[in-house]
Amino acid sequence: MQTYTNLTADELRGYMQEHHEKEYVLVDVRQQKEYVQGHISGAHLIPLAELSARMAELPCDRDVIFY
């Protein structure tokens, strides 16, 4: 079952501190140019316009965090 939760930036920081990086996947949904200018370490780039076509790239056994 899929569940969705909105997190604030502070809540995400807390989540990342409390969980090992292998327990979740960060997905940056901005454009390449924005990603190159700066992103959260370890985040994968999947631009929002490509997300539905690339959902198969996302794991089913970990939390997936989009930003």
Image (tube, rainbow, N blue to C red):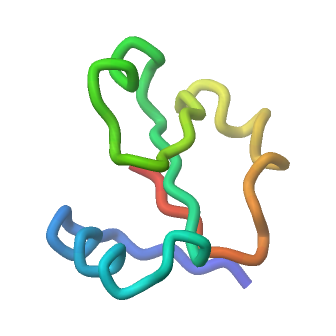
Question: Outermost residue, left direction?
Answer: 10
Q: Determine whether, in the image, residue 8 is placed left or right of residue 45.
A: left
Question: Outermost residue, right direction?
Answer: 56
Q: Residue at x 29, y 69 (%)?
A: 12
Task: Identify the image quadrant of the N terminus.
Answer: bottom right
Question: Outermost residue, top direction?
Answer: 33
- Is 13 located above or below residue 49 in the figure? below
Q: Position of residue 15 (x, y in %)?
A: 33, 79
Q: Position of residue 20 (x, y in %)?
A: 49, 79
Q: Residue at x 74, y 54 (%)?
A: 58
- Is 63 located above or below residue 34 in the figure? below
Q: Quadrant of residue 36?
A: top left
Q: Between 21 and 29, which is closer to the camera in this rendering?
A: 21
Q: Determine whether, in the image, residue 38 is placed left or right of residue 29.
A: left
Q: Residue at x 39, y 25 (%)?
A: 35
Label count reads 0
Q: Determine whether, in the image, residue 66 is placed left or right of residue 1.
A: left
Q: Position of residue 55 (x, y in %)?
A: 76, 47
Q: Quadrant of residue 52?
A: top right
Q: Position of residue 41 (x, y in %)?
A: 38, 47
